[in-house]
């Protein structure tokens, strides 16, 4: 394999200005869209030696056949063009959002001649102001019912309104005081629109102002003995206070913000968005992000913010877990978006939420940071729940096992699967892992790890690992690996070692070379009746022994998700053991130094935080550790460089 792809453009051909780039495959499909302050510097990262690239980035580069770029004037223009192209081309390697939930919103149709308020899931009403999203329809309907007592605006359908106009008789809501009845001329259309603007301003966070105004009007009416008006204002005040009591005050009353929490791993990310208006949580939204490339948290923040405000109106403050590199450009984009949509441009003097630019920041302290911590906790729980539900659903697991059986041509479903992965650091501390899934669920009590003293490469390591495992395999193929009726519960077989259970399917992390090495181990051990496959990280394709072409499972299928999950679990288990070995090796080297006991070794590792930092430290820094003098520090420095 060459160091990089053959179609790499020459470095001198790539401009150094800001711009947007697109990777395309052989069929000219756009695979990935990205932006850069310096196109040459950014694209050079993709054309580094393939072995040094992250596995997912390498898969994208190998899937592509060309790259093209467009130079723009500023970084902000690059941001806008990137958003436009992602929406237009829907590239498979860009972040994919999975939000199968349809949230209810409260909408006020200010663009209509006679505005109305309604609860809807439709985000395409022209000229409407939206509030939310909300998690429960019944909760927002209850709030609207209360609010109509304070702001009696129209909430009926178009047909009901026209019928009332023709007959001259208002509907029931008009008779009971929950509508000002513009349909029959009780108020003018201008007066009714003023009520609608007050309603929108109240929902936007100007709630305390209305409470104060209504309270003053009530007292003024009572002072002049206008008890009928005072009673009306009293009812409005009660409605406002009831509505406010349903939204707990969490921050100062002048805080309008959206707070984001993101929890992610190699395959997915869960996002939580809390909408705070007037210091109160007005709505909560959550969704899941599918990751094709390995993205850092700041890169995820950028895509999350873009998608969150594709339809919703941005507030003055956006709180994120980490600021992206182009935070200033995102702030400009959100500010312009806010101005275009006329957010906060309601009645004069009542639109504090529309003043000034949008600010994006990380909450560092105080009650805002406490709420951000709560949002982050919700995001972590949502990610765990997403993975648990997808892997724990019995129907989904059964379908996944059946699909694997069909795709690999197995006689029976793979009720017991074992997956193997090799880990090392530049050829040292070579270890391998074996993880076991029964009925689609992990059996951690049956995991095994292997230490490999000497090996030439990963294929040789796979061969050694499988040979050692197969030496303990039960010779009786008639013994079932798992009783299907137990559905993943521990199998009790007195007198038989669990390590000897025969798997239905062996999976190795790798492509054709790794599969060939595992097949050689099976042949040398004389084992038959066990299906073998490998999953390659390049395109997540499945390789079978002796096949020139891989098996391609649907990208979002439960079958591929299950195989990815067992592969990732084997990788995690191998990496964990390999790190333990590295730490133990350094500890054993240090323990050989006279005068350096276990307590001081532990203090050294605690002080520097990692073996890398300890190796990079000079004798002066080492001597600064409690209990370590200059002489021992010099000995440690020399020992770690032998």
Image: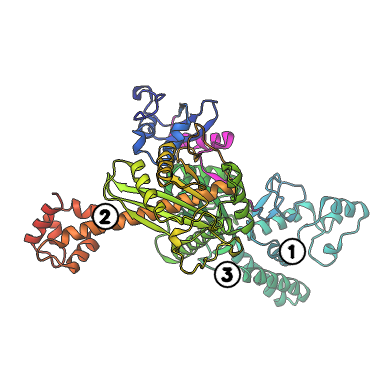
Left or right relative to 109: residue 206: left
Residue under numbered circle 1: 148
Residue at 48 percent across and 58 percent down: it is 501
Quarter-of-image position of residue 90: top right
Membership of 299 in magenta stretch = no
Bounds of the magenta segment: 73-101
Residue 248 is marked as 3
Question: Camera-side residue: 569 or 420?
Answer: 420
Which numbered disc flags the more N-terminal residue, 2 or 3?
A: 3
Quarter-of-image position of residue 173: bottom right
Which numbered disc flags the more N-terminal residue, 1 or 2?
A: 1
Numbered disc in front, either 1 or 2: 2
Residue under numbered circle 2: 582
Question: Camera-side residue: 19 or 90?
Answer: 90
Query: Alpha carbon of mark 1 to alpha carbon of mark 2: how far?
Result: 67 Å
Residue 510 is marked as none
């Amino acid at each position: 394999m060459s160091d990089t792809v053959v179609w790499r453009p020459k470095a001198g051909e790539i401009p150094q200005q800001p711009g947007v780039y697109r990777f395309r495959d052989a069929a000219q499909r756009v695979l990935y869209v990205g932006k850069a302050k310096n196109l040459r510097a950014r694209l050079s990262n993709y054309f580094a030696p393939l072995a040094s690239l992250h596995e997912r980035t390498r898969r994208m580069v190998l899937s592509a056949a060309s790259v093209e770029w467009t130079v723009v004037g500023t970084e902000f223009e690059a941001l806008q063009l990137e958003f436009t192209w992602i929406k237009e081309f829907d590239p498979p390697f860009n972040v994919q959002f999975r939000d199968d939930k349809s949230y209810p919103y409260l909408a006020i149709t200010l663009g209509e001649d006679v505005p109305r308020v309604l609860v809807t899931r439709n985000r395409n009403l022209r000229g409407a102001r939206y509030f939310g999203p909300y998690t429960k329809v019944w909760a927002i309907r209850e709030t609207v019912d209360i609010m109509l007592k304070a702001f009696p605006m129209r909430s009926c359908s178009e047909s009901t309104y026209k019928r009332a106009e023709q007959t001259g008789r208002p509907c029931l809501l008009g008779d009971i005081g929950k509508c000002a009845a513009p349909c029959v001329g009780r108020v003018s259309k201008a007066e009714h629109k003023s009520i609608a603007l007050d309603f929108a301003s109240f929902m936007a966070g100007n709630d305390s102002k209305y409470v104060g105004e209504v309270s003053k009007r009530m007292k003024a009416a009572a002072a002049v003995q206008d008890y009928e008006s005072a009673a009306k204002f009293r009812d409005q005040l009660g409605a406002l206070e009831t509505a406010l009591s349903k939204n707990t005050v969490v921050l100062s009353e002048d805080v309008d913000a959206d707070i984001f929490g993101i929890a992610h791993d190699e395959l997915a990310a869960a996002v939580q968005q809390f909408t705070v208006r007037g210091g109160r949580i007005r709505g909560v939204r959550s969704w899941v992000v599918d990751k094709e490339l390995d993205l850092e948290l700041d890169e995820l923040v950028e895509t999350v913010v873009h998608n969150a405000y594709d339809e919703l109106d941005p507030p003055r403050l956006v709180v994120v877990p980490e600021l992206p590199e182009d935070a200033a450009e995102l702030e400009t984009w959100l500010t312009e978006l806010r101005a275009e949509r006329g957010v906060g441009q309601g009645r004069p003097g009542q639109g504090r939420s529309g003043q000034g630019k949008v600010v994006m920041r990380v909450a560092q302290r105080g009650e805002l940071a406490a709420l951000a911590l709560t949002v982050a906790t919700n995001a972590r729980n949502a990610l765990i729940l997403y993975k648990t539900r997808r892997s724990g659903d019995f129907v989904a697991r059964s379908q996944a096992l059946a699909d694997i059986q069909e795709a690999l041509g197995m006689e029976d479903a793979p009720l017991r699967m074992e997956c193997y992965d090799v880990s090392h650091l530049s050829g040292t501390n070579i270890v391998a892992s074996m993880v076991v899934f029964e009925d689609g669920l992990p059996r951690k009590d049956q995991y095994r790890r292997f230490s490999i003293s000497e090996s030439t490469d990963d294929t040789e390591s796979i061969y050694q690992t499988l040979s050692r495992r197969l030496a303990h395999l039960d010779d009786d193929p008639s013994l079932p690996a798992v009783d299907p009726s137990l559905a993943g519960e521990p199998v009790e077989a007195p007198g038989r070692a669990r390590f000897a259970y025969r798997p239905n399917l062996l999976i190795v992390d790798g492509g054709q070379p790794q599969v060939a090495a595992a097949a050689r181990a099976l042949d040398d051990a004389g084992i038959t009746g066990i299906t073998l496959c490998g999953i390659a990280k390049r395109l997540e394709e499945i390789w079978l022994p002796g096949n020139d072409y891989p098996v391609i499972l649907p990208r979002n299928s439960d079958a591929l998700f299950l195989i990815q999950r067992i592969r990732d679990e084997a990788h995690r288990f191998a990496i964990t053991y390999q790190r333990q070995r590295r730490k133990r090796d350094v500890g054993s080297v240090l323990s050989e130094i006279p005068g350096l006991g276990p307590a001081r070794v532990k203090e050294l590792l605690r002080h520097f935080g990692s073996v890398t930092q300890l190796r990079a430290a000079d004798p002066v820094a080492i001597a600064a550790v409690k209990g370590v003098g200059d002489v021992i520090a010099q000995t440690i420095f020399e020992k770690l460089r032998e």
